Image (spheres, rainbow, N blue to C red):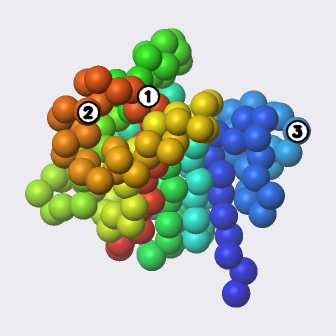
Amino acid sequence: MTIVKLQIGAGNNPKEGYINQDYRKYEGIDDVFDLNVYPYKYPDNCFDEIFAEDIIEHLDDTIKAIDELWRITKDGGIIKIYVPHFTHWGTFGDLTHKRGFSIFAFDYYMTDYYPCKAKFYSIKRSYVVSKNFKFLNIFNPIFNLSKFLTENFLCKFFLISRIYVELRVRK
């Protein structure tokens, strides 16, 4: 069985083994369309994995976008997301960013309390101290020991660059 993978917002960094999407035609981009226009061109349940690095924060409606990713991912499929943490200077230093994220932001989809279409199981949530200065990531295990402590205390003194989440689709 072939595993079908999609990378959204690939830009000039297409991934081998993925269908690479962006709103501009860069080298290696397979599909060109705007992620702010719904529904996406893909049929329901067609991807086993979706990779979204540094793109969700640029979209106009996060909930609609996540609902679409859920729709086009197979039951049990994985969605891997990198988004900027709300405390980092780059989150709002980039005028194209619409929002920053808390480590708990995607909990919205883990419960039946909220009226959302998309539902997920959380596989992994972790802080990434630095995207650009990789040596600082030696501190990742410390920040990831207690998400509550980091979110409510440590991130007020130490910048967290971004958050990585893996979500398993449940339908």
Tell me the kind of residue under disc 3.
Answer: Glu
- The tag on residue 60 is 1
Tell me the kind of residue under disc 1.
Answer: Asp
- The tag on residue 27 is 3
Under tag 3, what secondary structure?
A: loop
Query: Mark 1 to mark 3: distance in Å?
Result: 25 Å
Q: In front: mark 1 or mark 3? A: 3
Where 83 sits versus 47, above or below?
above
Where 61 sits versus 137, above or below?
above
Tell me the kind of residue under disc 2.
Answer: Leu
- The tag on residue 78 is none
| x then y, percent, for residue 72 | 52, 62
| x then y, percent, for residue 9 | 64, 39
- The tag on residue 154 is 2
Under tag 2, what secondary structure?
A: helix
Mark 1 is surrounded, within 10 Å at the Cα level, by few (under 14), some (14 to 19) or many (20 or more) other residues, namely some
Where 128 sits versus 3, above or below?
above
Residue 148 or 25: which is nearer the viewer? 148
Mark 2 is surrounded, within 10 Å at the Cα level, by few (under 14), some (14 to 19) or many (20 or more) other residues, namely some
